Structure formats: C-alpha cells, structure tokens
Image (cartoon, rainbow, N blue to C red):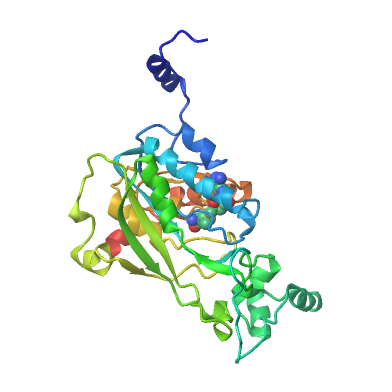
Amino acid sequence: MSRIPSKTRQRVEQNTTEWVGINRVICGDSREVLQRIRPDSIALSVWSPPYFVGKSYERHLSYEDWEALLRDVIAQHTRILRPGAFMAVNIADILCYPDTSIPRFQAENVVSKNRLPVTREAILKILERQPSLNRYEIAERLGVSEQTVDRRLKNNNIRGGKHSPQTRVKLTGHLVEDFAYRSGLYLYDRRVWAKDPAWENSRWHSNSYRAVDEFEHIYIFWKPGITKVDRARLSREEWSRWGSRAVWHFPSVRTNDDHEAKFPSELPRRLVRLLTEPGDVVLDPFAGSGTALVTAIELGRAFLGVELQPTYAALAHRACMKATQSMAHGLWTNPARSG
Ligand SMILES: C[S@@+](CC[C@H](N)C(=O)[O-])C[C@H]1O[C@@H](n2cnc3c(N)ncnc32)[C@H](O)[C@@H]1O
C-alpha cells in the first residue's frame, strides 16, 4: 500500500499527468481523453452528441450506453472547465423512441395506407442501370428528398421507424440537466434552434398527426466561478437580432456528404462569440467533421477536438489544418467584423 497521504498523492499524480496539448484533434473516446485535459483550462465546450436516432456511429450503443456516454462526458466537464466557463450542448428530442411496453398506436388512416414507397433495393436497381447518377438525380426520379435516398443507401433509418406503432417522443433536456446538475454544473440559459421545416424529409404528415422535426435545443451550463460579462462582444444590432433572442433561426446543413450529422457553423459561431474571448480554448468532445473547431480557429480561439471514429477525426484534423493555414495567410474574412 502507498504510504503517501491521499491529498499529497493526488497532487503528485496531478503533477505527473501528461496533459494533452491544445490546437489538435485527438482520435479517441471522450470519456478517456477528457481525463487528460488540464483542469480549469476550457473556456467553452460546445458539442452535439449522438442523438440516439440510429446513425452509423451510434449503432453499437444501447439506450443505456447512450445515456451513460452523455452522463460520463458531462461529468468530466466539472474538472476541465475554467471556473465561470460554459458548456453548450446542442441536442434534439428523440422523436421515435421505440418502446414495446407502451400500447400500440392504433391509426385508422383515411388518407393513405402507403408506407414511403422508396426502398433501398429500388435505389440500388436504379444505380445498377445508371451508376453515374448522384443522389439528387435519383431523388428527383423517385419524387423523394435527397436525404431519403441517402438514408436508404446508408441503411440509416430512424430507430424504430416513423411508421412503427410503438414509438413515443422522448425528451432529452431533463437528462442533460440532471447529469450536469449532479456534476456541479448549472443550467444558465437555453435557446431553441429553429431549423428549416424539413417537409421534403418526410411523408409522415400524410399518415400521422406528428410534426416533422424542425427544431433542436441548445442548453448552456455554467461552472461556478467569476464570468466576465462583456456586452461589447456583439454589436447592438447583433444583440437584438440573436444575442438576446431565445429562438435562433438558421438552416441546417443540407449536404451531409462527408459526415452524416454536422451542425451548421453558425451554431458554434454564435456561442463562441457570445461566451469566449480571443485566445480562449474551445473544446468539442464529439468533434465529427470539426465544424466547431474550425469556427473557433476562424474566430482566433484555441481549439481541442476529440472524435472516436478515425475517418472523422482525420477529416476534422484536415479541416483544422486548412483553417489554420487560411488564417495565417489572411485568406479568411471574419464575419464577426464584416457584419
Ligand atoms: C452529432 S455528431 C457531431 C458532428 C459535429 N458537430 C459536426 O458538425 O461535424 C457526433 C459525433 O460524435 C462522435 N462520437 C460518438 N461517440 C463518441 C465518443 N465516445 N467519443 C468521441 N466521439 C464520439 C461520432 O463519431 C460523431 O462524429
């Protein structure tokens, strides 16, 4: 047994830990990598986790695994956030949470009993005949959206399916709030991101009373400590247009060609501008294609990204290198200055 008193041992361990450096993308599991981030070093952690909707990068997770992932990553933030700093979580509710314990929804459909007629096999057949067609052209031929074609090709249907009679809406905000609260982080603010109405994404309005998915949440948590409040970070016009507004309107990413669930750069851009200063470190523990990291670079902040999938980590790394080079060569115009 060690004879070092536990407090001293903690100090010794802290001094000998090799902390990860900044301005890099690390390929790994956030639950492990975040343990190696220097305490009190992050000014803003801005991220969008897997949403438990059946994307390829989350298929290995059971619902319980998914909750545990959120809980563990949130818990790590208490140590790594600077006192007074923020964690901004962009998440949506789960619209089709499969639950066989609930009664079956019994719809008497007077409009159409048709399921969405486009199958993966139908798309593959078209591709067999005309391999040069892209998914927009296929979508046009089939009278569906490009996203439908993409989802069918990637076998990426929403878990449980929109047509399953045993799915329910599952709210996620209370989970995030509860995990944060138990870790010593407090809900400071929340915004709604109103995306474009995705009618073309879905035909379920023809055989359901459910709304299509057109908004997401942004929950902003605060670590106790002194927070600098600088109203000069935005212009008067920006404060009234979005800085002080609870509902943010901007479109989602229309072409998820290199990553299947990117958020638009406007989302991290607003949060980085509102909640950090130049030189601060911005973290994204679910970096994906690196959108938040690139935005941080463009705004003159330091960055740190963690991504589990090697392909996405490499994508984010390349994007960050490119943004850093553009900044160094003055090739980028800061939208914060140009309006
Ligand atoms: C919703 S996407 C984030 C997309 C990102 N905001 C963008 O704009 O590209 C979630 C990402 O988290 C990654 N991921 C899932 N589990 C992870 C884990 N345990 N550690 C790190 N990354 C993880 C997935 O591979 C996926 O790229």
Residue 221 percent across, percent down from the top left: 34, 49
Residue 152 in the figure: left or right of residue 266: right
The residue located at (51%, 52%) in the rendering is 319
Residue 34 in the figure: left or right of residue 257: left
Residue 238 in the figure: left or right of residue 34: left
Residue 329 visible? The answer is no
**Quadrant of residue 204 in the image?**
bottom right
The residue located at (41%, 20%) in the rendering is 10
> Relative to residue 240, is residue 300 depicted above or below?
above
The residue located at (45%, 63%) in the rendering is 264
Residue 275 percent across, percent down from the top left: 29, 51
Quarter containing the C terminus: bottom left
**Quadrant of residue 269 in the image?**
bottom left
> Relative to residue 81, is residue 14 depicted above or below?
above
Residue 29 percent across, percent down from the top left: 56, 41
Residue 232 in the figure: left or right of residue 6: left
